[in-house]
Structure formats: C-alpha cells, structure tokens
Image: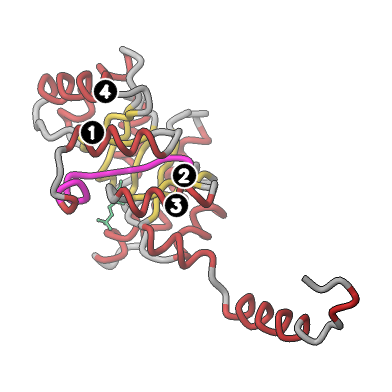
Amino acid sequence: MQLFIDTANLDEIRTAASWGVIAGVTTNPTLIAKEGRDFQAVIHEICQLIDGPISAEVIAQDAPGMIDEGRRYAAWDPHVVVKVPMTEEGIKATKALSSEGIRTNVTLCFSANQALLAALAGATYISPFVGRVDDTGGDGMALISEIREIYDNYVMTTQILTASVRSPNHVTMAAKMGSDVATCPFKILQQMFRHPLTDRGLEQFLADWASVPVLSGRA
Ligand code: E4P
C-alpha cells in the first residue's frame, strides 16, 4: 500500500518528503484555504516537492465546468490528478476527463455503490472517507473492505485511496484490507513512527553503549 500525505502545507510536505516513503499528496478546498495562498502556486510548489500524484479539486458543480477546470489543472503539471466530487455531474466529468487520459480522484465517497460508479466512469482513484463514516456512527473500514471485494470481483483498476484517516489504526486496517493507498494528515504519519518500546529500547541501548570502553572503538 502506498502512503500519501493529506495536506497543502509545504513545511509538512517537505518534512514528509525527507522520509522517502511518501508517494503522493491529496488536497481539498478546506486544506488549500487553510494556507491562505494562491491555489495554482501552492499546487505548483507541491509538485516540486513530491514526485507522485498530487490531487487538486475542482470547484465547479456542473460537468462542463468541472471538465474545463480539470483540463486547466492537468495542464499545470503532469503530477496533477483532478479531484472530482461524487455527484452525477462529477461522474460525467470523470468519464470525460478519463477518456482524455487525464487522471481523476473521485472524492466524498461514502458507499460501495458510489465506488462502483466511479470505477465504471474510469476514475484513477476513489476516495472513501472512513473517518467521516465513523463520525456518523458507521464503520468506515467496512466500506474499504466492500469496495475491495467489488473491484476484485470485476478486476476493476480504479485504486482505492483510503481518506479521512483519523488514526494509525485506520492505516493498518487499510493495508490489511488491500487498500491501494492511504492518505494521512501529517500528525498521523508522525504517530506511525512511534512506539513506546522503541523509545525505551533505544534509551537502554544508548545507556549500555556509554559503558563500552573507549579502546574497543566506541564512537
Ligand atoms: C481526502 O482526500 C480528503 O482531503 C481528506 O482525507 C478529508 O479528511 P477529513 O474528513 O479529516 O477532512
């Protein structure tokens, strides 16, 4: 499973890129608004930091408007993936953009049928929002499992991009269920590194190393 970072913050992306394990970036209008900067400039800078798919979301609500925006975004940089909402107009736009070879990410997916429609329209990615499903009392990870089963039944190539990730456990479950990608906030990626036994073990190793005689070649 690949890991993407879910942010438009350049400092977070720069730090995550330095780890060497982040394969792409997802943004949405809320994340872009938080940065208080020009959309195209932010996307352009993200494309310089990560050599992978960078999702940029359309704002238009009608298919012709989405197609127009999608074509413009795709022309900004070859890394750009056009993010389209899971609506009737969004699916029409996904079909049109994917027919032109423009990669798409269908967002705001909350059901297996929505994921089926996105795949039939040729979406490159489907983004089920697991955290928001959990927030409303549902089981977000069960949705990932359902979509995996459906896509595998028919050898559908749309990639499952687990989104709205709220905990490292969501990432573990996504990987176990065969999600193709999980996109995570910076804080969750940082939490994935940590384990108290790692900290305790390292502390002990360093304390023990301090007692090694210098003549043995201790650094
Ligand atoms: C996905 O592409 C979205 O940007 C994101 O994962 C939404 O997460 P949220 O529910 O925490 O806002």
Q: Position of residue 7 (x, y in %)?
A: 30, 50
Within 8 Å: ligand 1 and the Cβ of disc 2? no
SS at circle 4: helix
The residues colored magenta run: 23-33
Residue with the mark numbered 2: 181
- Which callout, 3 or 1, points at the residue further toward the start of the chain? 3
Residue with the mark numbered 1: 84
Q: Taking 37 as reference, is 69 above or below it?
A: above
Out of 150 and 63, give the one closest to the viewer: 63
> Which residue is drawn at the image coordinates 84% and 82% (left, top)?
212
> Which residue is drawn at the image coordinates 54% and 71% (left, top)?
194
Q: Measure how far apart labels 2 and 3 are at the Cα level.
A: 16 Å
Q: Measure how far apart labels 2 and 4 are at the Cα level.
A: 24 Å
SS at circle 1: strand
Residue with the mark numbered 3: 16
Report the amino acid beneath label 3. Answer: Ala
Report the amino acid beneath label 1. Answer: Val
Within 8 Å: ligand 1 and the Cβ of disc 3? no
> Which residue is drawn at the image coordinates 37% and 34% (left, top)?
48
- Which callout, 4 or 3, points at the residue further toward the start of the chain? 3
- Which callout, 4 or 1, points at the residue further toward the start of the chain? 4
Q: Where is residue 26 in the image (x, y as percent from the top left)?
A: 33, 43
Tell whether 174 sits left or right of 110: right
Report the amino acid beneath label 2. Answer: Val
Residue with the mark numbered 4: 76
- Residue 102's quadrant in the figure? top left
Residue 3 lies in the magenta stretch: no
Q: Do the residues labelled 4 and 3 touch (CB within 8 Å)?
A: no
- Which callout, 2 or 4, points at the residue further toward the start of the chain? 4
